[in-house]
Amino acid sequence: MDVIEKIKDQLSNPVVLYMKGTPDFPQCGFSGQVIQAMQACEAQFIYINILEDPELREALKIHSNWPTYPQLYAKGELVGGCDIIMDLHTKGELKGLLETANTAS
């Protein structure tokens, strides 16, 4: 499976967070902030540690046209990075967005 097929396969999940590290051990402050927001929303999601796969990390930047991590996807669409996610969380919109993504078929 090439890296683009791998990304498409991962994005078939309702909510995907590409991050540095893991939810239990984030490897950057931005990933840590997003994990806190996701946990506060009691979100169901899968995560991909982009530090474990340099080829995926670089290909995803091109695929998403987004140069930084973390990157949050809902229903295969890029939601955004840390600033956007934190803004949605502050406005109370993140939880609904994630719940909709997880209940949509």
Image: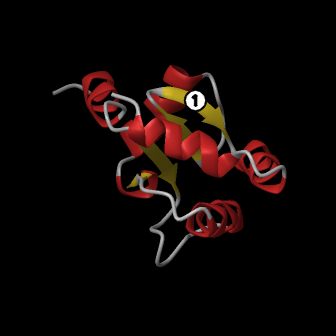
Q: Residue at x 55, y 24 (%)?
A: 64
Percent of width and height locating residue 48: 39, 52
Say which element carries label 1.
strand
Q: Is residue 71 above or below residue 65?
A: below
According to the image, label 1 marks what residue? 78
Percent of width and height locating residue 23: 48, 70
Percent of width and height locating residue 83: 79, 47
- Report if residue 69 is visible in the image: no
Q: Residue at x 62, y 45 (%)?
A: 96
> Is residue 24 shown left or right of residue 52?
right
Q: Is residue 53 above or below residue 7?
A: below
Q: Nearer the viewer, residue 61 or 72?
A: 72
Asked which quadrant contains residue 29, the reply is bottom right
Q: Amino acid at mark 1?
A: Leu
Q: Quadrant of the C terminus?
A: top left
> Is residue 22 shown left or right of residue 69?
left
Q: How is the image coloured?
A: secondary structure
- Report if residue 19 is visible in the image: yes
